[in-house]
């Protein structure tokens, strides 16, 4: 409940000269002065307020609507932004894994755009927006994968296939959706991109890192040693190890 | 022992009697009886809620209430949640904590909402209050895991640490290790909510913490805690009542069976949340708990579709609160209505808020079903893409006990999809039938008429949110003049201007606050309001530069008006303009 310190609820507006709360509904002959500061010249709108407050002499009630209908104010109304809604068609379709990176939970990105739409609409909190955006990007790609006839190992009802990836020397793990890939080449490219942020000191070259994966039995194997099909069916998680050569 | 004039009760007796009176409203009432009651009451008030941190100053608070133990503060206006309040606007808690650190050494609880708190302030809290027990930071920002480390290290009596939806900076070096700062002999944790943390937490430290705190009831993990680790935690804390899982994407049979075993040991579990990226194959693991659940938050579960949601929800016969994504669809809501007769609160969030076409089969029908089937439903937040007056009327008639009704039709100004009329009648029915309605959010195509209904019927309405609605000042006038209990009014993108605002200036003193953005309120009117109403702070928030570089009739970007007893604030950023204290017409 409110802390009410010395704020007496005015049941009747304080009867000072400035009584703009009187709007002319009651049959009341009271006239109220509108006191305005000496240097301030009222713009046309304030004449309307006077219209509302002063009741004309034959005591006719003036409806509020009547008072306002007479307003012929020419006012500059701020234009709201055009409502272009974000759509699923990315201009750079080949770059979607990067979108995941930009909007992943690990990017402390407060200013996720509301697509091309209006600021703050629909009214959902930033972190929900991030969640939705991640999800949307993934689904767009998954739909494409299904269309292209690619079906992943079938381990989940949804089409995505997230596995955890750790890069040696980097504290924070990432996730990659393997259903978006069909070869080690695209996978390692994507992974190197993902970790670019955290390893700026090192040379970002896929030759410097070796990709290993943990299979269902818990063993760690070099990814390059097996065919992609074998890999994709048994991979549990990934690691990028610095190679010595 | 001091005797009261005209009373035979000594002070101590009165104080004892007053200790049974907890509600602020009641305590405010008894403090007005006479001077001595005022004195006794103020010395014995332990719990204070300040709904707007700028409505009163720390000094005034401390002067009146010298021995507060629980302090709750709210800062930024609600629309800050949707990025409408520019960064740096204010709501800094530092001055409050600085004052409290010397005035209230016995402070036990601090609850903040939409405030900015720094690591330094967290450290000050941790060192100033020896008996500190509860820290709740709801939608706060400005701090990192460093600050949390200080709390962990120094608050020996901490019971509750709840970071609800706050933005916490991750400092790579220490991320996750702040938990290790809880001393080994610290065992009093009852509630821990770290769901909003992005970084990994040191699991060993977490496991040991959970293991040594036998009173732990509420544990909300963050996304980075995988399911296999969750099972370990559950076995350590089978007494948990509320649980938030981490991510659960890797479906592995061994993990699943382990988890199933762990869950079956949790006989007290009543509330579940989390489920980030959960593989649907895991859901059967929670079926055994479902009948006991009273609260279920699936609103982060972007990977669960309608059929799995239905299977889950249909087993939760005792559910009282459900937060879910619109993947549940109309069909799922029908099942909810049939299965969960004790449902009190429903929130349905959009999975694809920016899509042009609907991606799910969720319409007004889902909400109608729930309103029909769930007699105790009184709190609703519903995002959808179509609505009709008929549906709203049906909902209103079904649920006259509705107290909170927030409807968001995603495309602004969407008419009744059947008749292409405005939704005035439908919302009118809501306010007319739901006589205890306290909170209402409008959307869709709406004219001034809906505000006439609201002003006429919304007598208990305390908070109203309006966007892209109305035709003229009449709309605003209806609300300000009709809604007697209105405390908070927030408006965006409506053609409301000076007249209604100025004609109802006195009303603003009876409210906590008014927010108007992208409306038609001129700078001149703001100046006038500020000059004439000394008990109000009239803040013009405008990032286009000084308002007097534009004509006075030019509408302001954003306006935030709130009542205050402490005058204009001293921490305003460059883009906030208000009246100058010294000159009636100047600007600060």
Image (cartoon, coloured by chain):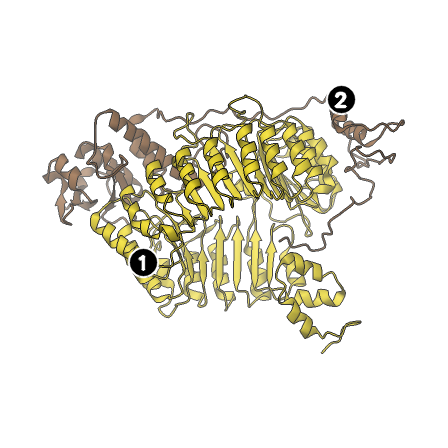
Instruction: For mark 1, name the chain.
Output: B
Residue A135 at x, y = what percent? 35, 36
Q: Residue at x 47, y 50 (%)?
A: B142
> Is residue B486 or residue A8 the one in the foreground?
B486
Q: Residue at x 74, y 68 (%)?
A: B36
Horizontal side, residue A137 vs residue B295: left or right: left
Reading the image, the residue beneath label 2 is A70
Task: Using the rendered view, name the quadrant where residue B160 is placed.
Answer: bottom left
Residue B492 at x, y = what percent? 58, 33
Residue B275 at x, y = what percent? 35, 46
Task: Using the rendered view, name the quadrant where residue B430 is placed.
Answer: top right
- The colour with which the image depicts chain B is yellow
Disc 2 secondary structure class = loop
Residue B185 at x, y = what percent? 37, 70
Shown in brown, the chain is: A
Reading the image, the residue beneath label 1 is B234
> Is residue B207 or residue B12 the one in the foreground?
B12
> Is residue A197 or residue A51 the one in the foreground?
A51
Residue B39 visible in rendering: yes
Distance between the Cα atoms at labels 2 and 1?
70 Å
Residue B557 visible in rendering: no
Horizontal side, residue B245 vs residue A48: left or right: left
Vertical arrangement, residue A78 with respect to residue B95, above or below: above
Q: Residue at x 31, y 59 (%)?
A: B265
């Amino acid at each position: 409940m409110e802390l009410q310190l010395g704020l007496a609820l005015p049941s009747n507006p304080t009867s000072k000269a400035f009584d703009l709360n009187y709007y002319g509904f009651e049959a009341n002959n009271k006239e109220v002065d509108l006191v305005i500061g000496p240097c301030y010249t009222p713009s046309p709108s304030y004449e309307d307020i006077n219209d509302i407050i002063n009741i004309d002499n034959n005591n006719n009630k003036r409806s509020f609507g009547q008072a306002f209908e007479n307003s012929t104010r020419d006012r500059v109304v701020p234009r709201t932004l055009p409502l272009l809604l974000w759509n699923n068609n990315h201009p750079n379709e080949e770059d979607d894994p990067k979108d995941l990176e930009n909007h992943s939970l690990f990017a402390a990105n407060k200013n996720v755009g509301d697509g091309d739409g209006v600021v703050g609409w629909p009214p959902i909190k930033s972190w929900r927006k991030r969640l939705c955006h991640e999800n949307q990007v993934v689904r767009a790609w998954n739909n494409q994968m299904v269309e292209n006839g690619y079906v992943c190992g079938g381990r989940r009802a949804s089409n995505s296939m997230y596995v955890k990836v750790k890069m040696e020397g980097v504290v924070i793990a990432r996730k990659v959706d393997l259903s978006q890939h069909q070869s080690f080449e695209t996978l390692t490219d994507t992974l190197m991109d993902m970790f670019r942020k955290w390893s700026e000191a090192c040379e970002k070259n896929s030759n410097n890192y070796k990709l290993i994966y943990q299979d269902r039995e818990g063993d760690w194997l070099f990814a390059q040693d097996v065919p992609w099909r074998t890999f994709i069916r048994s991979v549990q998680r990934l690691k990028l190890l610095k190679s010595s050569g | 022992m001091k005797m009261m004039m005209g009373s035979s009760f000594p002070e101590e007796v009165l104080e004892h009697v007053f200790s049974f009176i907890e509600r602020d409203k009641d305590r405010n009432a008894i403090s007005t009886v006479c001077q001595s009651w005022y004195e006794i009451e103020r010395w014995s008030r332990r719990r204070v809620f300040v709904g707007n941190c700028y409505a009163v100053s720390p000094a005034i608070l401390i002067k009146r209430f010298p021995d507060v133990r629980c302090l709750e503060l709210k800062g930024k206006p609600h629309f800050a949640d949707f990025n409408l309040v520019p960064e740096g606007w204010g709501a800094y808690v530092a001055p409050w904590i600085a004052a409290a650190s010397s005035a209230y050494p016995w402070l036990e609880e601090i609850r903040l909402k939409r405030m900015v708190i720094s690591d330094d302030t967290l450290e000050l809290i941790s060192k100033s209050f020896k008996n500190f027990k509860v820290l709740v930071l709801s939608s706060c920002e400005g701090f990192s895991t460093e600050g949390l480390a200080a709390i962990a290290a120094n608050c020996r009596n901490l019971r509750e640490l709840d970071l609800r939806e706050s933005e916490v900076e991750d400092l790579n070096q220490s991320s996750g290790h702040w938990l290790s700062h809880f001393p080994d002999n610290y065992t009093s944790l009852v509630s821990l909510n770290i769901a909003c943390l992005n970084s990994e937490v040191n699991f060993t430290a977490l496991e040991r913490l959970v293991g040594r705190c036998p009173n732990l009831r509420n544990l909300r993990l963050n996304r980075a805690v995988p399911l296999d680790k969750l099972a370990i935690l559950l076995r350590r804390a089978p007494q948990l009542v509320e649980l938030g899982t981490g991510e659960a994407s890797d479906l592995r049979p061994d993990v699943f069976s382990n988890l199933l075993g762990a869950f079956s040991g949790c006989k007290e579990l009543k509330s579940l949340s989390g489920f980030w990226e959960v593989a649907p194959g895991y859901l059967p693991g929670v079926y055994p708990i479902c009948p006991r659940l009273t609260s279920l938050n699936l609103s982060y579960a972007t990977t669960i579709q309608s059929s799995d949601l239905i299977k889950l929800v249909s087993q939760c016969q005792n559910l009282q609160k459900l937060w879910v994504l619109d993947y549940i669809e109309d069909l799922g809501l029908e099942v909810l209505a049939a299965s969960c007769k004790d449902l009190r609160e429903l929130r349905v969030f959009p999975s694809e808020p920016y899509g042009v076409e609907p991606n799910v089969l969720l319409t007004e029908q889902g909400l109608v079903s729930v309103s029909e089937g769930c007699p105790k439903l009184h709190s609703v937040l519903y995002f959808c893409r179509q609505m009709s007056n008929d549906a709203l009327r049906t909902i209103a008639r079904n649920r006259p006990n509705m107290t909170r009704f927030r409807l968001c039709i995603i495309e602004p100004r969407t008419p009744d999809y059947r008749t292409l009329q405005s939704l005035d009648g439908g919302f009118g029915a809501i306010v007319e039938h739901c006589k205890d309605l306290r909170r209402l959010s409008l959307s869709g195509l709406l004219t001034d008429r809906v505000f006439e209904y609201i002003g006429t019927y919304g007598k208990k309405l305390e908070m109203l949110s309006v966007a892209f609605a109305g035709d003229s000042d009449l709309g605003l006038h209806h609300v300000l003049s009709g809604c007697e209990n209105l405390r908070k009014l927030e408006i965006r993108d409506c053609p409301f201007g000076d007249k209604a605002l100025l004609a109802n200036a006195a009303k603003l003193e009876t409210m906590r606050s008014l927010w108007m953005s992208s409306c038609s309120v001129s700078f001149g009117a703001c100046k006038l309001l500020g000059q004439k109403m000394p008990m109000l702070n009239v803040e013009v928030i405008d990032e286009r530069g000084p308002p007097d570089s534009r004509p006075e009739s030019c509408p302001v970007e954003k306006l935030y008006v709130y009542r205050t007893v402490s005058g204009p604030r001293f921490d305003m950023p460059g883009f906030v303009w208000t009246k100058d204290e010294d000159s009636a017409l100047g600007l600060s």
